[in-house]
């Protein structure tokens, strides 16, 4: 761990020297400020030359332009399941690019797309047997949204067009997916959005009424019942689908209470509403199984997935569709009028196949199932630090919520929360850990290490967190 001189009132300023020169001879930090538009990024910082530039990665670490070695506590963006620098994935990409670098799956198929679709269908429990590729998570959600509407039209219920998602959820940024994303600051600049989307409660039991704190079953029932109420208010004959993450990321790892998903499945069946499991983060081992719904014991009608499918080495997403939803598309003359040029790209599919082969060879699913409780136990040691309120999550996906008074769960004032946030991310980075403080609600630190991590890496994470959270505890 690096030694630090910063304090809460004096957050570290991380220097980011230019990472060499572009082929045109411009210092890269300058070229980035002028030409590269970062996503969810304040360009003014980059224009001032503050461009955090990551140079290479190996295993659970990456190195930046200053030569700092940083633990990747977020797997890039919940993505690099097998770790950085895997030669097998590079070789799989090169092999496939040399054989067939591109062909669309529009009317034609190719070998990697077929092989991966079969493998995903075989791996997904239940009737999720049909794979529609995308290039990422937003497109997967967009696809599921359009598919739900189209499906109901095909089966003679064209009025079923409305969709429901949960409070604070993040489902992506394209217009349809953004309409399901229930984060006001992301939505407002783009209104009007797609009409007919409403929201229901999420499963943030930590911030629920105190009567639920020790009764997760009752909380889960109440949360699930808000879905039934909403379907009835909207009119069941107008509701197409309910979108839900197995463990909601935005807001900080809201795990489902016991019985929650069984009740949701029941409600969706009763009112003929498709259950869409948005597993863009949770699938491919992040919370345990290859698909999160398996661990949580429910069967969705549609699964959206992406991030971990190729460990982020190439862009790819996959929507898994049940036999029931696929059925009307088997009729001659019927097709889903939707697609993306690059979806299911042969190189991407080949890398995903190799990524899943690594999962198999290295037993990553079992590893997460076995080590997940150790990760939880290690993080729970931090509870002796004042302000550590809640530690929650599943598998290798955890959130640590900081709060003014863990006893009463009193929130920080806005000013305190801003101070902590301004300190946390640079202080963690300075100390050698990349992860992030969610800025979409209470102060929650999000952790999602590569699945190749184990107890040694958990201890490293805990040590850095102890150092940085300890500073907050001493100085706030
Ligand atoms: C649950 C969920 N759905 C959808 C998305 C959108 O994925 P992408 O950024 O690949 O478009 C994300 C991204 O973080 C996500 O977490």
Image: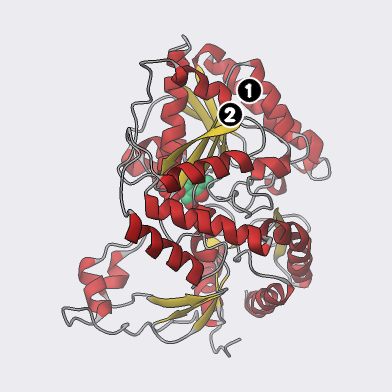
User: Which residue occupies the extreme left position in the image?
Assistant: 24
Quadrant in which residue 219 is drawn: top right
Q: Which residue is at 43% across, 67% downward?
A: 90
Mark closer to the chain start, 1 or 2: 1
Quadrant in which residue 400 is drawn: bottom right
Q: Within 10 angstroms of label 1, few (less than 14), some, or many (20 or more) residues?
A: many
User: Which residue occupies the extreme right position in the image?
Assistant: 214
Give the image location of residue 143, x and y in percent: 42, 34
Give the image location of residue 427, x and y in percent: 54, 78
The image's colour scheme reads: secondary structure
Quarter of the image containing the C terminus? bottom right
SS at circle 1: helix
- Image-based side of 225 in relation to 194, left or right: right
Quarter of the image containing the N terminus? bottom right
- Mark 1 or 2, closer to the camera: 2
Residue assigned mark 2:
301
Residue assigned mark 1:
268
Give the image location of residue 301, x and y in percent: 58, 29
The answer to whether one can see residue 91 in this image is yes
Q: Which residue is at 59% across, 48% downward?
A: 283
Quadrant in which residue 417 is drawn: bottom right
């Amino acid at each position: 761990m690096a030694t630090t001189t910063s304090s809460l009132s004096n957050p570290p300023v991380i220097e980011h020297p230019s990472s060499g020169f572009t082929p045109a001879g411009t210092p890269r930090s300058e070229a980035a400020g002028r030409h590269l538009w970062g996503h969810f990024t304040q360009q003014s910082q980059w224009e001032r030359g503050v461009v955090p530039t990551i140079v290479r990665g190996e295993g659970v670490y990456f190195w930046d332009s200053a030569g700092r070695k940083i633990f990747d506590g977020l797997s890039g963006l919940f993505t690099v399941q097998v770790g950085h620098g895997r030669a097998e994935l590079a070789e799989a990409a090169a092999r496939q690019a040399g054989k067939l670098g591109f062909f669309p799956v529009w009317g034609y198929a190719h070998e990697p797309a077929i092989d991966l679709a079969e493998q995903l269908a075989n791996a997904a429990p239940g009737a999720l047997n049909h794979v529609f590729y995308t290039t990422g998570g937003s497109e997967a959600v967009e696809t599921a949204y359009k598919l739900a509407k189209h499906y109901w039209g095909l089966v003679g219920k064209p009025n079923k067009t409305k969709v429901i998602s949960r409070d604070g959820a993040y489902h992506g940024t394209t217009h349809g997916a953004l309409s399901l994303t229930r984060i006001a600051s992301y939505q407002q600049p783009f209104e009007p959005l797609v009409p007919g989307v409403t929201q229901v409660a999420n499963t943030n039991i930590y911030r629920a009424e105190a009567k639920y704190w020790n009764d997760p079953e009752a909380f889960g029932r109440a949360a699930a019942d808000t879905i039934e109420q909403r379907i009835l208010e909207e009119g069941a004959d107008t509701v197409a689908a309910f979108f839900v993450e197995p463990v909601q990321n935005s807001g900080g790892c809201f795990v489902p209470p016991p019985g929650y998903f069984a009740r949701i499945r029941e409600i969706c069946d009763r009112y003929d509403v498709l259950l869409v499991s948005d597993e863009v983060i949770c699938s491919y081992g992040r919370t345990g199984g290859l698909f999160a719904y398996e661990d949580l014991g429910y069967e969705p009608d549609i699964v959206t997935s992406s991030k971990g499918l190729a460990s982020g080495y190439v862009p790819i997403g996959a929507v898994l569709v049940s036999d029931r939803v696929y059925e009307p598309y088997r009729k001659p003359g019927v097709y889903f009028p939707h697609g993306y040029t690059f979806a299911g790209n042969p190189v991407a599919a080949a890398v995903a196949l190799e990524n899943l082969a690594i999962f198999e060879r290295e037993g990553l699913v079992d590893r997460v199932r076995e080590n997940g409780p150790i990760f939880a136990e290690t993080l729970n040691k931090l509870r002796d630090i004042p302000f550590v309120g809640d530690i929650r999550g599943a598998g290798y996906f955890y959130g640590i919520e900081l709060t003014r008074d863990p006893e009463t769960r009193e929130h920080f004032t806005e000013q305190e929360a801003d101070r902590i946030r301004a300190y946390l991310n640079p202080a963690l980075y300075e100390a050698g850990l990349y992860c992030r403080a969610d800025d979409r609600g209470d102060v929650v630190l999000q952790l999602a290490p590569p699945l190749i991590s184990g107890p040694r890496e958990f201890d490293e994470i805990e040590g850095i967190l102890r150092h940085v959270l300890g500073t907050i505890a001493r100085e706030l």
